[in-house]
Image: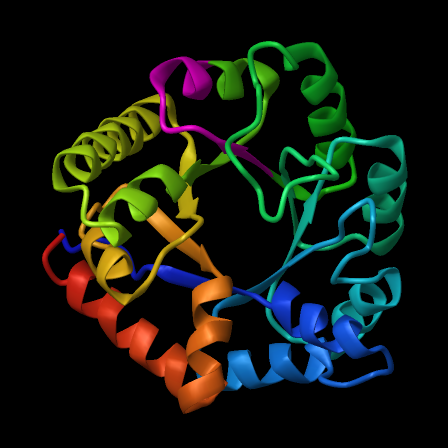
Amino acid sequence: MPAPRLRLGVNIDHIATVRNARGGALPDPVRGALAAIAAGADGITAHLREDRRHIRDEDITRLMHAIDKPLNFEMAATAEMLAIALKTKPHAACLVPEKRSERTTEGGLDVIGGHDHLKAFTAALKAADIRVSLFIEPSVKALEAAVSIGAPVVELHTGAWCEAAMTGEADAAEREFARIVLAADKAAQLGLECHAGHGLDFDTARRIAALPQIVELNIGHFLMGEALFVGLPSAIRTMRAAMDEGRSKA
């Protein structure tokens, strides 16, 4: 049986980063989301951070009204973000770690130390019929904790693998990829829907696409960087082709 088509979620945070660098309304992340969908994105991801460094509250509201594909609302497990999620009712909410000083998300959630806290947030979101995912490290213990917390979906943090691959650390890259392979297989055994993301480019997306247990990739920063040179639709179509090529080997 062939592996299911691999979904592509496009993160539009850094369109908002460029907008906010100067102020005003342009470039518009909602326009970017619509362009991404037209080019082949299966969904849109947006992270509303506590400090509102890129996506703003009104962006989430406008996205909910403007797009006809699922919105994946990345959020810290805070009372403020829970209230926004319950009010806006996105298709999905991905609980992610968040620190004010970080430039980007530095790793997966502490699903073991934060078990009870995350379980309460997961239950509240599920009760509102919002699909919940946890952004976690590719480890068996983290996956088992995700099951105990009650999340139906996990997103494996691919940052360490992608960083090692980008810097030419071949041995480290292979070790990190082996962790992802093991985690994806374990997720399937546990009945978890498995996504992946962070740091993916054309080459790493092509390779990870060959893992049939992974059903969705969420990619943002790399696509926005490529878009500066070739345009967003072209970057997304090239990414889609790379993913399909990798998937054909699953």
The percent coordinates of residue 200 (x first, y second) are 36, 56
Q: How is the image coloured?
A: rainbow
Instruction: Reply above or below: 210 against 142.
Output: below
**Residue at 85% from the left image edge and 77% from the top image edge:** 23
Q: Is residue 176 left or right of residue 196?
A: left
Q: Residue 46, position in %: x, y?
A: 66, 59
Residue 212 appears left or right of 28 = left
Above or below residue 44? Residue 100 is above
Q: Which residues are magenta?
A: 133-144
The residue lying at 50 percent from left, 19 percent from top is 147
Query: Which one is in front, 239 or 54?
Result: 54
Residue 141 % position (x, y): 41, 13
**Picture layout, residue 130 above or below residue 115:** below
Which quarter of the figure has residue 172? top left
Residue nearest the viewer, comparing 22 with 94: 22
Q: Is residue 143 magenta?
A: yes
Residue 21 rendering spot, x and y as whole percentages: 76, 72
Left or right of 174 on screen, residue 232: right
At x 16%, y 68%, the residue is 245
